[in-house]
Image: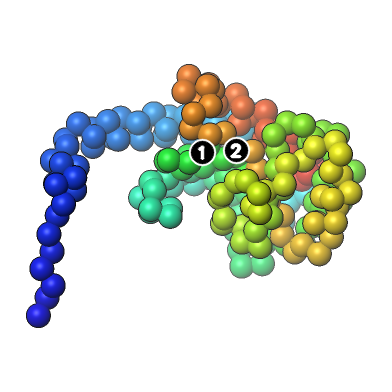
Amino acid sequence: MDQRITFTPDEVARLADTEFFRAKNQISAKVRQSLEQLHRAFQLELVGRNLLKPNGFNPESAQFVKGENLEDFPYQYLDFPRHYTREEKFSFRSLFWWGHHVVFALILEGSYIRQYKQNVINRYPMLVDQGICLCLSPSLWEWKVGPGFTLELTQDRKSEVAAVLANRSSLKIAHFLPMTHPLVQSGEFVPVGQEKFRAMLSIITPP
């Protein structure tokens, strides 16, 4: 016999709250517009750039994704550039994770990983003290920030970062903006994404 399902008064109120869903749709549309602006900005940044890119990389490939359940919260993201195979990852993800933060992340794995890691160390001054972090999880799909999850690239941590990178077969570098950040609230986080994208390009360009 099926278990009887009942809704709490709070759940009923949420189900009946038509304004919430209208507001959610409006916010989602604005997030999509922001991601489209980022896409155009990133395209301009790549003009004339020589990249350490995997075989089969398509410079035009991009993907906009919208979902409802990233650890129970809605999300939207842009992948550009975008290249994913089982063995190789070469992508920049701009993720808007409801209830958490906006993330700009470079995701790398594959034949050039040794050079990418060397570039992080050799071009460390181009990355430090900008709120850019090395993601520590062995999973490239972990999006939390803070102790145990990320290590911020600061001037005094070069040797620590090198030690963490030494045995890694993949690499994820990211910048996190909390939803309470003034640049998020003012809708001015697109230039931040462009700035971080430009800085992280130093990792995927030849020596």
Q: Is residue 195 left or right of residue 52?
A: left
Disc 1 marks a residue whose amino acid type is: His
Q: Which mark is residue 176?
A: 2
Residue identifier under label 1: 101
Residue 58 in sight: no
Q: Are marks 2 and 1 in contact (CB under 8 Å)?
A: yes
Q: Position of residue 173 (x, y in %)?
A: 69, 46
Q: Residue at x 43, y 55 (%)?
A: 71
**Secondary structure beneath label 1:** strand
Above or below, 123 relative to 58: above
Q: Position of residue 132 (x, y in %)?
A: 70, 38
Q: Residue at x 56, y 50 (%)?
A: 143
Q: Is residue 129 left or right of residue 65?
A: right
Above or below, 114 relative to 12: below
Among the 4 quarters of the image, the one containing residue 124: top right
Q: Position of residue 26 (x, y in %)?
A: 30, 30
Disc 2 marks a residue whose amino acid type is: Phe
**Which residue appears farthest toward the top when viewing the image?**
186
Above or below, 26 relative to 158: above
Q: Please identify the quadrant where the N terminus is shown.
A: bottom left
Q: Position of residue 58 (x, y in %)?
A: 62, 50
Q: Is residue 40 left or right of residue 56?
A: left
